[in-house]
Image (cartoon, grey):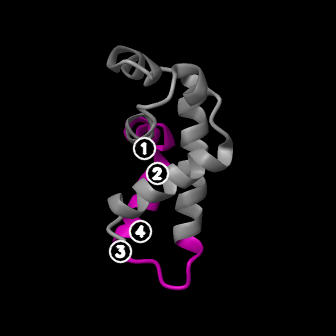
């Protein structure tokens, strides 16, 4: 189990944050490609596509909180599809879905 200090330090793991930024960009594209994106989805997507690292900063904290029961090594080794699922869930809430 990761300590809070380890979870805090993982916020600055550039490889993890970059993967989360890509997942956020993919989710933004999914929102915009939907038949009828909501105003919240368009706003979130626009902000994310404009500043993916800013979105990743917020989403990294969410992903880390959901993984608090894992070790730092397990968190760093998350599969891309697991990261995408966590980012999708958070983005839905942040965009008001």
Is 84 in front, or is 95?
84
Instruction: Determine contact: label 4, label 3, CB under 8 Å.
Output: yes
Indicate yes or no whether the magenta region holds residue 19.
no
**Label 4, label 3: how many angstroms apart (C-alpha)?**
5 Å
Instruction: Determine contact: label 1, label 2, CB under 8 Å.
Output: yes
N-term-proximal mark, 3 vs 1: 3
Compared with 33, 7 (above or below) is above
Q: Residues within 10 Å of mark 4 (few under 14, many from 20)?
A: many
**Label 2, label 3: how many angstroms apart (C-alpha)?**
14 Å
Compared with 81, 12 (above or below) is above
**Label 4, label 2: how many angstroms apart (C-alpha)?**
10 Å
Q: Residue at x 55, y 29 (%)?
A: 75
Q: Position of residue 41 (x, y in %)?
A: 41, 68
**Label 4, label 1: how many angstroms apart (C-alpha)?**
13 Å
Horizontally, is 94 left or right of 63 in the view? left
Is 49 in front, or is 26?
26
State the residue position of label 4: 41
Instruction: Determine contact: label 2, label 3, CB under 8 Å.
Output: no
Indicate yes or no whether the magenta region holds residue 53.
yes
What's the magenta region? Answer: 32-61
Is 69 in front, or is 49?
69
Compared with 11, 42 (above or below) is below
State the residue position of label 3: 39
Is 14 in front, or is 61?
61
């Amino acid at each position: 189990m990761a300590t809070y200090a380890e979870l805090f330090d993982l916020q600055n793991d550039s490889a993890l944050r970059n993967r989360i930024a890509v997942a956020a960009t993919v989710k933004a594209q999914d929102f915009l490609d939907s038949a009828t994106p909501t105003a919240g989805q368009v706003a979130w997507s626009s902000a994310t596509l404009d500043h993916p690292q800013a979105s990743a900063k917020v989403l990294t904290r969410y992903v880390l909180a959901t993984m608090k029961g894992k070790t730092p090594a397990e968190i760093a080794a998350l599969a891309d599809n697991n990261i995408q699922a966590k980012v999708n869930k958070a983005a839905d809430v942040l965009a008001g879905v």
